[in-house]
Image (cartoon, helix red, strand yellow):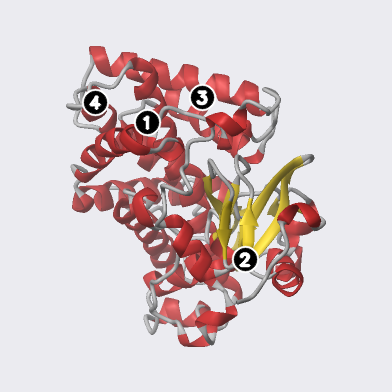
C-alpha cells in the first residue's frame, strides 16, 4: 500500500495566480510528481483545500456523497464573509451545495425543468442567435470572438430558455462572470440575486414556457429563496462553463493541426473537437467541491474534516494511468460534467448549444485564423475555471446571413 503524507505537512500550491492560469498542465505535472493524487492547495490566499488529480480517486469521491457531502455550512463558519470566492463555494439552497434529502429535492426540480427543454427547438434558437451575432461583425474582417460571438450567443440562448428578458439577462451575465473570477464578488452576488428575484417575480405575473416558470410550479414547492438559488445554478452552470467550452474548442481548432483544417473539411466533427477540449481544457478545470464531516483515509492519505476537497477534472482527465492521450479521439469518458449524484443534469442541452454555435460559426467564416500569435493568448486567473481573456481572429468579410 502506498503511503501519503497528510496535506497539512506539505507546502500548498496556489490555484489563483496568473502563473497557474498561464500553464496549468505544467502545474499538474509538478503536482503529480511531488504529491501523487492528493495535492495540498490554496483556493485563495489563506484558504486551504485538497485537490484530487488522480482519476480513480476523483471517481471514488464523486460517487461517495456520504463521506464527501457537498454541504459546506460547517466549514463556512470559519470563513470571513468577505472571502472573494465564497459566492462560488459557500452554502446555497440548491443542488450544487446541499446533501441528502435537500439535494434530492433540489435536483428533482432542476432536472424536471430541464428535461422539458426541446433540444430540436433549442438548436433552432441557438442557430438564429448565432447568425444574428455573426452579422454584427461579418464585414469587419477582424473581431474578438469571445466578446462579439461567444458571450452573446451563450447568454441569449440560456436567457431564452430561462425566460429572462434582455434587461435582466445583461446584469445576470455580468455578475456571474465576476462571481466566477472573484472580482467584487460580494457586490456581484448581490446584483445577481436581485436580478434573479426580479426574474422570478416577472414569471409569477407573466408565466411562460420556460425553465423558471416550470421551477415556480414544480411539485417540490420551492420557496422564493430556493427558486432564486436554483436559478443561480442554472445560469451559473450554463453561462460561464458553456462560454469557456465554446471558446476553448474554437481555440483548439485554430491552433491544433489535428483539428483545424480537418473540421473545416468535414474529416473530423465539431463534436470530436469539443470532446478533446472537454478532456484537455474542461471549462471548469477544478470544482465539484465536497466537505468531509470526518477525516477520510484513502490508501493511507488522510483528508481532513471540514476542509474543501476539490476535484481537478482537467488533471484527472489527463492522468497518465489512463493511457496515451493520443488514442482517445472519440472517447467521451471525461469528468468535465462531473459524475455520480452531482453530475450535470443539463449536459445534453449544453452540448447542443455549444455544437450549434460552433457549427454556425464555422459554416459562415470558413477561413478563421488567430489575429495574434498563439503564445500571446491569455487566460483569466481563478482557481476553478479555464477561461480565455479574449479570442482575437481574422477572416474574409462576408455578406450578412439570413437570420430566420
Name the residue nearer the viewer: 149 or 387: 387
Mark 2 or 1: the one toward you: 2
Report if the CB atoms under discs 4 and 2 are less than 8 Å apart.
no
Residue 20, labelled with which disc? none
Task: Give coordinates of residue 130: x percent, y percent.
Answer: 39, 50
How many residues crowd around disc 1 within 10 Å: few (fewer than 14), some, or many (20 or more)? Answer: many
Judge the density around disc 2: few (<14), some (14-19), many (≥20) Cα neighbours within 10 Å.
Answer: few
Q: Is disc 3 surrounded by few (<14), some (14 to 19) or many (20+) residues within 10 Å?
A: many
Of the residues under marks 4 and 1, which one precedes in the sequence? Answer: 4
Asked if labels 1 and 4 touch by Cβ distance under 8 angstroms, the answer is no
| 3D distance between C-alphas at marks 2 and 1 | 38 Å
Measuring 27% from the left and 33% from the top, which residue is drawn there?
211
Tell me which label, 3 or 2, sits earlier in the chain: 3
Position of 199 relative to 16 (above/below): above
Mark 3 or 1, nearer chain start: 3
Mark 2 vs 1, N-terminal side? 1
Image quarter where the N terminus lies is bottom right
User: Which residue is denoted by mark 2 in the rendering?
Assistant: 300
Checking the image for residue 230, the label placed there is 1
Report the residue marked by disc 3. 192
**Disc 3 to disc 1, how far (Cα)?**
12 Å
Circles 3 and 1: CB atoms closer than 8 Å: no
Q: Are marks 3 and 4 in contact (CB under 8 Å)?
A: no
Amino acid at each position: 500500500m502506498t503511503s501519503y503524507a497528510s496535506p497539512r505537512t506539505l507546502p500548498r500550491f496556489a490555484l489563483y495566480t496568473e502563473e497557474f492560469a498561464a500553464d496549468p498542465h505544467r502545474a499538474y505535472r509538478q503536482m503529480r510528481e511531488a504529491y501523487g493524487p492528493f495535492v495540498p492547495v490554496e483556493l485563495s490566499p489563506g484558504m486551504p483545500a485538497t485537490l484530487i488529480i488522480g482519476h480513480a480517486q476523483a471517481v471514488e469521491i464523486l460517487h461517495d456523497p456520504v463521506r464527501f457531502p457537498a454541504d459546506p455550512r460547517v466549514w463556512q463558519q470559519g470563513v470571513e464573509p468577505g472571502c472573494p470566492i465564497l459566492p462560488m463555494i459557500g452554502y446555497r439552497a440548491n443542488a450544487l451545495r446541499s446533501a441528502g434529502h435537500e439535494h434530492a429535492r433540489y435536483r428533482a426540480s432542476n432536472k424536471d425543468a430541464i428535461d422539458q427543454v426541446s433540444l430540436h427547438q433549442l438548436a433552432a434558437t441557438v442557430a438564429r442567435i448565432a447568425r444574428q451575432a455573426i452579422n454584427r461583425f461579418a464585414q469587419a474582417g477582424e473581431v474578438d470572438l469571445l466578446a462579439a460571438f461567444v458571450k452573446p450567443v451563450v447568454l441569449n440562448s440560456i436567457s431564452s430558455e430561462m425566460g429572462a428578458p434582455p434587461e435582466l439577462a445583461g446584469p445576470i451575465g455580468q455578475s456571474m462572470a465576476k462571481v466566477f473570477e472573484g472580482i467584487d464578488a460580494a457586490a456581484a452576488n448581490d446584483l445577481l440575486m436581485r436580478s434573479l428575484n426580479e426574474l422570478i417575480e416577472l414569471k409569477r405575473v407573466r408565466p411562460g414556457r420556460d425553465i423558471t416558470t416550470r421551477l415556480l410550479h414544480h411539485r417540490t414547492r420551492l420557496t422564493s429563496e430556493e427558486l432564486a438559488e436554483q436559478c443561480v445554478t442554472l445560469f451559473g452552470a450554463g453561462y460561464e462553463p458553456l462560454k469557456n467550452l465554446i471558446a476553448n474548442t474554437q481555440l483548439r481548432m485554430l491552433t491544433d493541426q489535428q483539428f483545424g483544417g480537418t473540421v473545416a473539411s468535414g474529416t473530423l466533427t465539431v463534436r470530436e473537437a469539443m470532446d478533446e477540449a472537454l478532456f484537455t481544457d474542461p471549462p471548469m478545470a477544478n470544482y465539484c467541491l465536497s466537505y468531509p464531516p470526518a477525516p477520510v483515509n484513502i490508501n493511507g492519505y488522510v483528508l481532513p474534516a471540514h476542509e474543501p476537497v476539490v476535484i481537478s477534472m482537467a488533471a484527472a482527465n489527463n492522468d497518465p494511468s489512463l493511457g496515451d492521450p493520443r488514442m482517445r479521439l472519440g472517447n467521451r469518458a471525461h469528468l468535465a460534467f462531473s459524475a455520480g449524484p452531482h453530475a450535470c443534469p443539463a449536459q445534453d442541452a449544453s452540448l447542443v448549444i455549444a455544437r450549434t454555435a460552433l457549427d454556425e460559426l464555422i459554416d459562415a467564416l470558413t477561413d478563421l485564423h488567430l489575429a495574434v500569435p498563439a503564445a500571446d493568448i491569455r487566460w483569466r486567473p481563478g482557481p476553478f475555471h479555464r477561461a480565455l481573456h479574449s479570442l482575437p481572429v481574422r477572416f474574409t468579410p462576408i455578406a450578412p446571413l439570413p437570420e430566420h
